[in-house]
Amino acid sequence: MAVEVLGKCPVCGGKTEVVKIYCPLCETSMEGHFKLCKFCALTDEQKAFIDVFIKCRGNIKEVEKELGVSYPTVKNKLEDAAAALGYKEDLSQADKAEKRKSVLDRLNSGEISVEEALEMLKE
């Protein structure tokens, strides 16, 4: 039975490495040090989120519906997955002001609740 490659050690959390590859069809074995793709470092939950995000073509409203969660939860899951892939959010002051304005505009239009707006402004 094949098991998905673990990108992180279940004992210490360090990055794992594949050292042997085997083909059951021709019974060829290769040993060495093989680099894992960056998606192997994602947790099962992060992989499931990314799967839904891609299925919904990045439409956050559709992701909200599919997962049954709020906008801030979708954004947090996206940031979590992005950080696990090595993409750190580094917002400038202008970006932060724009983000804040966007949240307030969405609140004003009734697209999000006060609680959701407060949660988003904390981020």
Image (cartoon, rainbow, N blue to C red):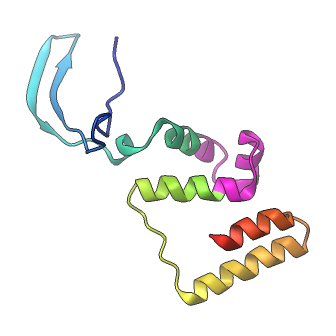
Q: Quadrant of residue 1?
A: top left
Q: Quadrant of residue 66?
A: top right
Residue 59, can we see it? no
Residue located at (60% from left, 57% from top)? 76
- Secondary structure, magenta segment, majority class: helix
Image position of 1 with respect to 120: above or below: above
Q: Is residue 3 magenta?
A: no
Location of residue 119 in the rendering, given as x and y in whole percent from the top left corner:
72, 65
Residue 19 screen position, x and y as percent: 14, 31
Vertical placement of residue 89 versus 57, above or below = below
Q: Nearer the viewer, residue 31 or 16?
A: 16
Residue at the front extreme of this rendering: 11
Q: Position of residue 68 (x, y in %)?
A: 76, 42
| Numbered-mark total | 0
Instruction: Determine whether, in the image, residue 44 is placed left or right of residue 102.
Output: left
Please give the name of the residue rendered at 85% of the width and 71% of the height, measured from the top-left corner.
Answer: 107
Magenta segment = 52-74
Would you say 25 lies left or right of 33 here?
right
Residue 29 appearing in the image: yes
Is 64 part of what is drawn in magenta? yes
Asked if 92 appears above or below 120 in the picture, the reply is below
Determine whether, in the image, residue 27 is placed left or right of residue 65.
left
Residue at (90%, 72%) from the top-left corner?
A: 109
Residue drawn at (67%, 46%), measured in percent from left and top? Answer: 56
Residue lying at the far bottom in this picture: please name it. 94
Residue 8 is situated, as x and y percent measured from the top left of the image, at 31, 40
**Residue 48 is drawn in which quadrant?**
top right
